[in-house]
Every structure is written in structure tokens, then in C-alpha cells.
């Protein structure tokens, strides 16, 4: 069996393993570290991937990209890393852990999230300078916070936040519970929250677009399935789910 | 430490696991010290943000210990001395924050005390008072998580205390309140101190409930554990320095209280 497996693997690798149909060698476990904002889309894609590749099992670690990058650099057992911006990905690449170049697979725009009904009457970034409103932002150290900082700089607004949350989902939950009047999240988060949260677009979002790169890691014990997963995300089914979730094509 | 030979020698079956436990507890600290960037230590420690996070941590942990003493000692007395229906339920409630993941505790506090919460909406509507994102909110979150340590210690001390002293006080005409104040409390004093120290230490390290309920804003709600977590996102070395500072401060304070603490346990 061993030589046969090797041949199949070799063929799969030579053929770039790009198509969603080449699942001959793609069984086994793959551990994906992905930005918190990818939670819903990647979970859905993984279900379809597992259905298309019998024997494959995708395990996720969702969290703030910067924290995930740190875990990977410290030796966490990840096979695939998908980050919410390029600077966090650069840390992993600089550590020599990426197998090939990281490629951007989706982009995401910032949006103002308000609780359903928008009782505070938020209309744009300028409202974030009002000290009497309860406002949540991401901490500057995580990608959503870094992007928001750029957008505020572009708008010339000095925000007066009440809390700097540890990741974008924490901002979203404060908004959906109605504990804050507004927060800055990604367009995709507003979409994922359903009716509990309303989104307000703002022109400065153009200045702070996040590119999401994805890479297979050198440490992946089963590179074939890791590549197959990455290819699947970039393929037709992945694109459909990601677009539906509100991500833009790169 | 005195080690005597012969049959007084401490049994290996106890000393060996104790040594293993000590190593197990010490190793993470060794890891922090080994990774600490000693050269930039000064810069990190003198930054105003670190000073404000440390000040806020000490203030909030002390405040929540005071609140825990005011509410927790009476609760421990009620659990130890009164028989009433539902005592088992109350005791289980005391254990709840110990088993609940602190983040869940924080969400639960938001659902009750948040401005749309069951109680919080009235606080907000009538008093214009809102706990989330305030230093008071930090104290509430830390008290929720840390008070059980005090209640359990004090209840244990009350159960172990000789009740005959209280009975004698009663025969001499003391009311239960006077007996509690003049006889019981001095008797269980070391237990109260031990509980308060545990409670304070737990509050000082509190992270999950605090960041979920009170949020994270430097100077207002960002305690040291939150500063460490956020620093970890971008600058792991700074996170190590902040952790060491928190450990050092708590060790200094705990060692200062050691005599009384050991006396109680």
C-alpha cells in the first residue's frame, strides 16, 4: 500500500492539487488557525469540504489573528493559517514557517454596527467622538482595531471609546447585547449577526480595507490535505460561501 | 527547616510528591523569568500605562475584597450556623463562580446588570447608573469571581471553631449578634484573613469576567491581566514583563501576610 500511496501523493502534488475533485490522498486531519471574522464562513466551508473529502477532518482555532500568529510562531500545531490582515501574516512568514507565499483570498470592509433600532441615532464615524455615547472598538493591537484607527485618521475623527475589545467578535457581542450604542466591526460580522445588529457603511472604510491572506505552514504533518483545504476555500464552493458571508473578492 | 534522621525522617511518599508539586508550580515562573527582556525592563515598568493598570488592579482587587468581607462573612455565618430550607442551594450558588468559566460569568453579569439587563435596565432608567465599562464594573466582576474563596474559608473556620464559647457567651446574656462580634469573629479571625488573602489574590488575577463585563479601557477598566492579554497580541515581551510585575507585587504582598495566613491554615 505504501508505494501506491506515495504515487498518489506525488500525482496529487504534481497536479497542484488544485481541483476540488482530486481528493484521492486528501484524508486525515487538518488544523486551521483562522481570524475570528472567518468563523461562520470557514465553519460552513469545512462542512462542505468534509462532505466532499470522506475521511477528512477539519479542526479550527478561531481567534484574533495577531494572537494566532503568536501561537504559531511559538510552535502551536497549525497546518493552515488565515489572517485578517497582511501584517500579522508577515510575522509568520518572517519566522520562516510558511510553505510558499501567502496569498490574499478575500477582502473585508469595516462597518459601523449598531443595535437593531439604532436608538442613539448613529450615522457616521463622527458620532464616535461623542463622549456621552457608549462605544466599542477593537484594541489597536488586533487587525480590526488597526484598520479602525486608519479609518478614523482618514476621517479626522478622534474616537472616545468606552472599551477596546480583544477581538472583533467581542465588539459585536457588546453591540448585539445593546451594551454599547455602536462599534466598529467588519461588514461580514454585521451580516453574521442577523437581525440583532444593523450595519452602517461609511466612506472612509475605503481607506482601511483588510486583505485576508492564507498559507499552508511548513510544519503541517499532512501537507496534501492542508493544500486541498486551501484550494477548496479558494475554489468555487469556498468563493460562494465567502461572498454570501459578505466578503469581497481580492 | 529541620530534618531529623531515624524514624522521625519525613516519609518519602509525602516528600517526593511535594517536591514534584513545587517544581510544577515553579516552572512557569522560571519560564517567565527566562524569557523576560531584562534590558527594556526599566522602560516597560516606568510607562504611565503600566502604572495606571497596576494602580487600577490593586484598587479593584482591594475594593472587591472589602465588598466580599462585608457580604461574604455574614453569608459564611448563615451557612455555618443556621438551618434553613434551601441551604444546600445557597451553598451550591457559592460554588457556582468557581466552576463557571469566568467569561460566562461576565456574560451572565451583562445579562443581569448591563443597561439592557434584567436589573441593569432599572438602574440605568431610574438612577442613570450603568456598571459596564466602569471601574465599579471591574469591582463587581472581580467580587463575583473571588467572593466564594472567602465564603468557603470562613465557613470552614466557623465549622471548626468550638461552639461552646458561643454557648457560654449566650448563657452570660450575650445576644447572638454580640456573641458573633465579641466571641466568634475573633475566634475565626485567622480564617477570615486567609479567606481575604485568597479572595484578593483571585481578584488580582481576574481576567475573563472583567474583560467581558467591564470591557477594556486603559485607566478606567484595564487591569494588569487585561493589559497582559492585549500586550500579548502585539508585543509578547512586554506581556512577559507585565506578568512578572504582577507576580512580583502579589508575592510581596502575600509574603507580608504570610505569618497570619499560615497561622490560619
Image: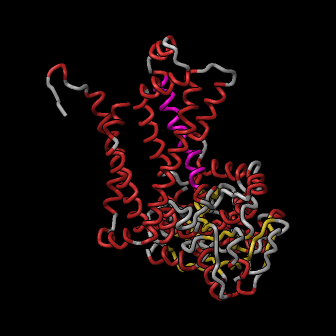
Question: Which residue occupies 69% across, 83% down?
Answer: A250
Q: Is residue B156 magenta?
A: yes
Question: Which residue occupies 57% across, 55% down?
Answer: B138
Q: Main secondary structure of the magenta part?
A: helix
Q: Position of residue B89 (x, y in %)?
A: 66, 28
In the rendered image, is residue A145 in sight?
yes
Q: Is residue B223 above or below residue B89?
A: below
Q: Position of residue B29 (x, y in %)?
A: 35, 53
- Depth check: B262 or A95 in front? B262
Query: Which image quarter: residue A73?
Result: bottom left
| Location of the N terminus of chain B (image quadrant) | top left
Q: Position of residue A102 (x, y in %)?
A: 56, 78
In the rendered image, is residue A7 in sight?
no
- Depth check: A32 or B24 in front? B24
Question: Which residue occupies 62% across, 70% down?
Answer: A138
Tell whether B106 sits left or right of A100. right
| Location of the C terminus of chain B (image quadrant) | top left
Segment tinted magenta in the rendering: B138-158
Q: Position of residue A38 (x, y in %)?
A: 68, 67
- Depth check: A207 or B89 in front? B89
Q: Is residue B77 above or below residue A51?
A: above
- Depth check: B215 or B154 in front? B154
**Colour theme:** secondary structure
Amino acid at each position: 500500500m505504501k508505494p501506491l500511496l506515495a504515487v498518489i501523493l506525488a500525482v496529487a502534488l504534481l497536479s497542484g492539487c488544485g481541483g476540488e475533485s482530486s481528493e484521492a490522498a486528501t484524508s486525515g486531519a487538518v488544523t486551521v488557525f483562522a481570524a475570528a471574522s472567518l468563523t461562520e464562513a470557514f465553519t460552513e466551508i469545512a462542512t462542505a469540504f468534509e462532505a466532499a473529502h470522506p475521511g477528512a477532518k477539519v479542526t479550527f482555532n478561531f481567534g484574533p489573528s495577531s494572537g494566532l500568529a503568536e501561537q504559531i510562531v511559538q510552535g502551536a500545531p497549525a497546518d493552515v493559517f488565515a489572517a485578517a490582515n497582511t501584517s500579522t501574516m508577515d510575522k509568520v512568514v518572517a519566522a520562516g514557517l510558511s510553505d510558499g507565499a501567502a496569498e490574499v483570498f478575500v477582502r473585508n470592509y469595516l462597518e459601523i454596527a449598531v443595535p437593531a433600532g439604532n436608538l442613539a441615532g448613529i450615522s457616521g464615524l463622527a458620532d464616535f467622538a461623542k463622549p456621552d455615547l457608549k462605544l466599542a472598538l477593537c484594541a489597536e493591537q488586533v487587525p480590526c482595531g488597526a484598520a479602525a484607527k486608519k479609518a478614523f485618521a482618514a476621517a479626522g475623527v478622534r474616537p472616545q471609546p468606552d472599551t477596546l475589545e480583544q477581538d472583533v467578535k467581542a465588539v459585536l457581542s457588546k453591540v448585539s447585547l445593546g451594551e454599547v450604542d455602536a462599534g466598529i466591526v467588519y461588514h461580514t460580522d454585521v451580516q453574521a449577526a442577523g437581525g440583532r445588529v444593523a450595519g452602517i457603511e461609511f466612506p472612509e472604510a475605503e481607506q482601511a480595507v483588510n486583505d485576508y491572506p492564507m498559507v499552508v505552514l511548513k510544519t503541517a504533518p499532512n501537507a496534501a490535505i492542508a493544500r486541498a483545504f486551501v484550494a477548496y476555500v479558494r475554489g468555487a464552493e469556498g468563493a460562494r460561501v465567502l461572498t454570501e458571508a459578505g466578503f469581497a473578492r481580492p | 527547616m529541620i530534618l531529623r534522621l531515624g524514624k522521625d525522617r519525613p516519609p518519602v511518599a509525602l516528600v517526593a510528591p511535594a517536591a514534584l508539586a513545587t517544581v510544577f508550580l515553579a516552572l512557569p515562573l522560571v519560564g517567565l523569568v527566562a524569557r523576560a527582556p531584562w534590558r527594556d525592563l526599566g522602560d516597560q515598568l516606568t510607562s504611565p500605562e503600566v502604572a495606571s493598570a497596576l494602580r487600577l488592579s490593586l484598587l479593584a482587587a482591594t475594593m472587591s475584597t472589602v465588598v466580599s468581607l462585608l457580604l461574604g462573612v455574614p453569608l459564611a455565618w448563615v451557612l455555618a450556623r443556621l438551618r434553613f430550607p434551601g441551604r444546600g442551594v445557597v451553598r451550591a450558588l457559592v460554588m457556582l463562580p468557581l466552576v463557571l468559566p469566568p467569561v460566562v460569568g461576565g456574560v451572565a453579569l451583562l445579562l443581569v446588570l448591563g443597561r439592557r439587563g434584567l436589573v441593569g435596565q432599572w438602574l440605568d432608567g431610574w438612577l442613570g447608573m450603568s456598571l459596564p465599562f466602569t471601574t465599579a464594573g471591574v469591582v463587581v466582576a472581580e467580587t463575583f469571581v473571588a467572593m466564594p474563596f472567602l465564603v468557603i474559608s470562613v465557613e470552614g473556620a466557623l465549622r471548626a471553631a468550638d461552639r461552646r464559647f458561643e454557648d457560654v457567651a449566650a448563657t452570660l446574656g450575650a445576644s447572638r449578634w454580640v456573641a458573633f462580634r465579641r466571641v466568634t469573629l475573633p475566634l475565626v479571625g485567622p480564617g477570615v484573613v486567609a479567606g481575604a488573602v485568597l479572595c484578593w489574590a483571585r481578584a488580582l488575577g481576574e481576567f475573563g469576567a472583567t474583560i467581558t463585563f467591564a470591557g477594556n479601557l486603559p485607566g478606567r477598566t484595564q487591569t494588569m491581566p487585561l493589559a497582559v492579554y492585549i500586550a500579548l497580541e502585539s508585543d509578547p515581551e512586554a506581556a512577559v514583563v507585565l506578568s512578572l510585575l504582577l507576580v512580583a507585587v502579589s508575592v510581596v504582598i502575600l509574603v507580608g501576610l504570610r505569618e497570619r495566613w499560615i497561622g490560619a491554615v
